[in-house]
Amino acid sequence: MKKIYLFLILLLGATSVGATYKAGYYDKMDGKQKEALKAAAKECVQNHTRLNYTDLPTYWQYTDVYPDLVNGSRRWWDMYSDNVYLIYSNQSARQSFSANKMQREHSVPKSWWKKDGDVEYTPAYSDMWNLYPSDGPANQAKLNYAFGETDSPKFNNGVTKVGPARTGLGGGSGNVFEPADEYKGDFARTIFYMATVYDDLDWVIPYMFRKQSWPTLQQWAVDMLLQWSRTDPVDQKEIDRNDGVESQQGNRNPFIDFPELAEYVWGTRTTETFYIKDQGGTVTPPIVGEAELIRPENGMALDFGETAVSQVSMRPLEIVARNLTSPLSLRITGADRSNFRIEVTSISAADLNTADVYKLNVYYAPKSEGVHTATLSLYDGGLSLGKDVAVTLQGQAFPIPTLTAVTALDATNVSDTQYTANWTEAAEVVDYYVVTRVRYTEDGPQASELVADSNSLLIEDRDADVTESYTVRSSRLGFLSPASNAITVAKSNSVVGIENTQPLALGHVEGGFVVLIDNPQTDMRIFDVSGRLVAEYAFVSGGDMIELPTGIYVVVTKENQKPIKTVVY
């Protein structure tokens, strides 16, 4: 049995060598998704040598024989029984096969594609990826039944079970064939191969296959086979058989070389793009339990508050899900749906099942004034009926505000350690005020921004030995007013009022600099270190923020021709 084989491998000190396909063999699959990925996989592996059906035992001696000997003889690897079928040293493979009364078993029964009494018109008839050596009684018991699971087997030899299908399985087949747990993944990957390479066959018995190139498999079969593949992952037996089959008929099974390929085509990763370089990592674990969407709760609201028309607000929606078997779909509906958007319309089940919390960015971009509401629905993913979730999206849009500058007033309550910055109240309704504070240190001006809810702000970390200044802007819906005049708090503890002026100075902020002047200046020009003019402004005021890429710049204005050097980081 497979588990014994793996144990022997470990005793011998060997390890799995992994996929050994030739460079470039699967290149057509790179960068594909779902249906296109399946079609590309077919292109990569469909061409192979068509073997003689009668001669299959001759080929199987290189692919379906245990690596260990029994009393000095080789043993057929039969996935349908635990009987010991030996190949004696004086026998050919075909002689042993005949002497043991073994049979050539089609995993996907040939009667499923039979046309006008003919089953040999397709290479599937002798494709080694669809045929295995089989115990005779087990083969006769399974007949042409669908794969499935049964709770009351009529035939059970310890490896093969045949009996009535468990509810939801079988696709109409009265009885089903259930392989042993250690071979369920092997057979699942066989059927994935058949559904990929022979997706153009006219399937006359539709238990598991559809008469379509996509998705080819019936949904119940997809769900069951994916779970079989997860619970019985690729092992050394399949890796070795993959190499062996390629040596005999010239093609490989991509679902063995890439254990997650089926998830990208039919399962938890269908929203993801397949890249060969990303393969070989974590595989999808078995799905245990019912699919559930823990967060968000059905009926909750995501409130964007107030936003200006044509502006964009973003809110993260936390999603927590477990045991999803397919991607979670998302859709926005309602009369106001055009005012809201999401970056994706589906999220892979693999991402959701493995993440503690998945954060979906939801955007409100109102196109008109007023209150807007819509519904974000989360569904699919294998969720049972009635488990879908609806989230209410709501926001209110206002016109883009027109803001006028406030007037900065003298600082009050000035001491060696603190002072209160003051300014007039805004003439318009505002959300808050932004105070730009600049400290003139030995290392140059150091700017920072503070937020105040009213028209004053207590500064509690003043250094009496450092001169500083402040300007103020009001904010509404994310927009800022022009900057106020600058108030200077001198290091002598005296206050220089609004009538005093200061020359051009630049305050460092991340991604640019802040202009520090009392009165507006004109014709600002900014040069890089090579002397190239990179930006110019006809008019600048105190508090204006100039954004620039990282670098070293030289700044001049008409009123201040002496160049000022600044570094943007």
Image: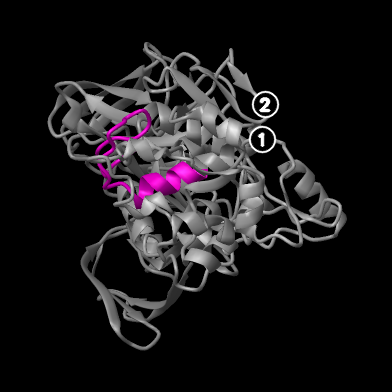
Give the residue drawn at x 76%, y 61%: 89
Q: In this view, does 496 lie above or below 405?
A: below
Residues marked 2 and 1 touching at CB (< 8 Å)? yes
Residue 48: percent from left, percent from top: 41, 65
**Rendered image: mark on residue 40:** none
Amino acid type of the residue that numbered disc 1 sits on in the rendered structure: Ser
Res. 420 visible in picture:
no
Q: Using residue 346 as the reference point, say whether residue 140 is left or right of it.
A: right
- Residue that carries the numbered disc 2 in the rendered image: 157
Where does the magenta region start and end? 189-216
- Which residue in the rendered view is the most extreme toward the bottom? 530
Reading the image, the residue beneath label 1 is 81
Name which residue lies at 37% across and 11% down. 386
Sequence-wise, the earlier of marks 2 and 1 is 1
Work out whether residue 288 or residue 456 is closer to the camera in this orientation and state it: 288
Q: Main secondary structure of the magenta part?
A: loop
